[in-house]
Image (cartoon, rainbow, N blue to C red):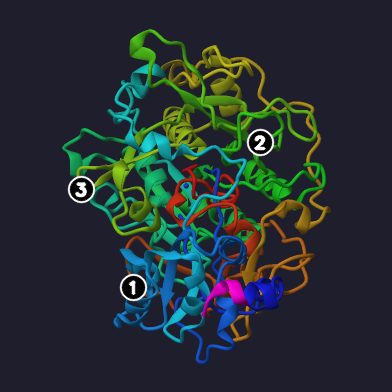
Amino acid sequence: MDMTGVAAARPVEWAERTVRRARGTLAATATVLAMAIVAIASAGPMSPPAAVPDASWKADPALVRQAQGQPSSTLRVIVRELTPASDRAERLVRSLGGSVGRELGLVDAFAASIPGRGLEPLADSPAVLRVWGDARLTSHIVDTRKYDTWSANTIWRGAIGANGLGGPGKNGAGVTVALLDTGVAHVPDLEKRVIERVDLTQDQDGLDHYGHGTHMAGIIAGDGTASNGAYVGLAPAANLVSIKVASWDGSTDVSEIIAGLQWVVAHRAQYAIRVLNLSYGTDGTQTYKLDPLDYAVEQVWLSGVLVVVAAGNRGPSPGTVDKPGDDPFVLTVGAANVHDQNAGKPVVEADFSSRGPTPDKFAKPDLLAPGISIVSLRDPDSTVDMFHSSAVVGTSYFKGTGTSQATAVVAGIAADMFQQNPSLTPDMAKAILLSTAKPTSSSSHTPIVNAAAAMSSATTYAGPPANVGLKPSTGLGKIEGSRGTFHVYSSPGAGNAHPKLLRGEYDVFWDKWVPLSWGSDAWYSSPFVDYTAETSGWDTGFAKKGWHGTGWDETAWDKKGWHDAGWTASTWTTYLYDLSSWG
C-alpha cells in the first residue's frame, strides 16, 4: 500500500497506535558499551507471541514519521522475522523495491533498505514481528565508535606506571573482585578464577551475551593465555565473582542493580571480596543524601569493599557524571586519552568522559585512567561483538573505549594494592590512589592514576583516610529518582503478563519498592532471591524461578540506531548500556 495515501487519511493515527501497542508487546530488540550507554527498545523474551495483533503497531514511530514525510526516501531498517528460517520477509523487502543486508541472527533479524512507501506493507506482513530504524537519530552522547579503528593501545600501561604489575606479589592473588555487569563468557584467560556466577536476569546462565562484562573482566584479571601473554590484565591472579544484571540487550533496572549490591554485602566474607567494579550509571539527579542507589553503594563501601564506579560517557559538558558515580564516598573514574603520549602530546581527559560537578557540588570524577582502544577479552557473537567488527583483535580480543574500561583499570590496580596490604580499608585505598595520582592537562584538573606510586604507598601510607566528615545517604528518596530518564519494560513476577513500562515506586517485578536490608543474612529474605541463580565457577545447575526479564523503552531506543551497539551502561554508563560506546 502506498504510504502517501495513508498519510492523508490518518497522518498521526498510525504512529500513535505504534507507541500505544508497542508498550504492550513481547517483541524484543537489540542494543549493544559507555558506560556510558545506549538503550534499546526490547520488551521481553526472544520467542514470538502466540498471536500477532493488528500488525500496524510494529514499526518504530520515528521511522513511521520519516516514511510519511518522505515516501520516496530510502530507509535503513532492521527487520525482525516471525520465522527466521523462512525467507518470506526478505522476499517481501525485495518486492517492495528494497535490498537485504546483513543477517542479525542474535536477534532473529536482518538489515535492509526500503523506500519510505514500503514501510507500511512491510510492517503489516504476518512474516514480520517488528521494524526499527537503523539510522542515527539525535543524541547528546558522544559517539565512541570512531575509536574502533584506532590502533590497539599498547602504551597505556607505561603511561600509568603499571608495567611492573602482574608478577609475584603484584598480581592480585588472594583477592576477589566482584564484577556487577552483563556476566562473563567462558574464556581461557579467566579459567578457574571466576569462582562464583550470580544471575539476576531471565537468562539464569551467568554467561555474557552482551560482551561488556567479559571485556571488563579481562582488563581486571585476564592472564593472557590466548595471546601468549601479550594482553594481560592488571591483576592476572585475582579471582572474580560475576554478578549478572543485564542480558543481551544491556537493559536492567536500578532495583536489580541494588539487589546485586546487596548480594555482594551478604557474600563479601565468603568470597574474600575486596573490590567492586561497577561500570553502570543513570542520569538521575536526586541528591545522594536520599538516593537509594547511592545508599546501596555506600553500604557496600561500609562493609569493607572498595567500590570503583564509572563516571559515564556523557561528556564533555559539566554536570554529566552518572549516578552512583555522584556519590562522594565511592571512587569515581573518568577516562583519559593517553594514546598520543608517544608523540609528545599531554595526557588529557577523553572527550566523551563525563564531568562534574555533581548535583551536590562534588568535583567528580576522582581520578582518570586510560580508556581509549583498550584491548581485552572478546565475547564472540555477543551484541557488542556483532556491532563492532572493526574493533576485533585476532580471534580472542577486542578494543573497547569508555569510562567502563578506565574503571576496570583502577579496579585491577586496587586488587594488587589489597594483595600487598590486606589491612587496607576502602577509605585508605581511596586516599592512596588519590594522593599518588599524577596531574594531567585536563580542563577539569582531574589527575590520572599512578599504579607504581599507589603500589609503593600501599604499605607505607601514613596520611589521613578519605571521606572524613562526609554525610552518608539515608536511602529514603525515590527509586524513580535513581532511574533518571531511562526506563525499561518488565513483566510482573514470573507470570506471563505483558511487560509494562516500569515507572514509579516499584521494583523490577512490579512489587512496591521497599528499601532492602543490609545485614549479613539480609540477602536470603530479599524479594530477588527466588529469581537469582547461583553456581560455582563454570559448573551448571542453575535452577531458580524464571521471569521474562527487562527490555528498553521506545524513548531510549529512539536515541540511537542499531549500528551504535556499543560500550556504555545507563546504560552501562549512559544510560544503562549505551550503544554508542563502551563504558
Residue depth check, mark 2 versus mark 1: number of the one nearer the observer: 1
Question: Is residue 578 left or right of 360 when viewed as pictured?
Answer: left
Label placed on residue 321: 2
Q: Residue furthest top?
A: 344
Whole-percent x and y of residue 322? 65, 41
Query: Which residue sits at x=56%, y=64%?
Result: 67
| Residue ID for mark 3 | 395
Work out how far the residue at label 2 is from the one at label 1, CA to CA, in angstroms.
46 Å
Mark 2 lies on a secondary structure that is: loop
- Res 521 visible: no
Of 52 and 319, the residue lying toward us: 52
Circles 3 and 1, Cβ within 8 Å, touching? The answer is: no
Label 1 sits on residue: 94
- Residue at x 64%, y 41% (from the top left corner): 301
| Vertical arrangement, residue 12 with respect to residue 256, above or below | below
Q: Which residues are magenta?
A: 1-5
> Compared to 516, does 281 lie above or below?
above
| Residue 206: % across, % down | 41, 64
Can I make out residue 548 in this image?
A: yes
Number of dots carrying numbers: 3
Q: What is the x, y in percent for residue 426?
A: 60, 34
257 and 65: which is toward the camera = 65
Sequence order check: which comes first, mark 2 or mark 1? 1
Q: Is residue 83 left or right of residue 408?
A: left
Query: At label 3, which amino acid type do we have?
Result: Thr
Circle 1 SS class: helix
Closer to the camera, 389 or 450?
Answer: 389
Considering only vertical position in the picture, is 98 above or below 349? below
Pointer 3 or 1: first along the chain: 1
Name the residue located 35 percent from the left edge and 60 percent from the top edge.
537
Specify the farthest residue to the left.
228
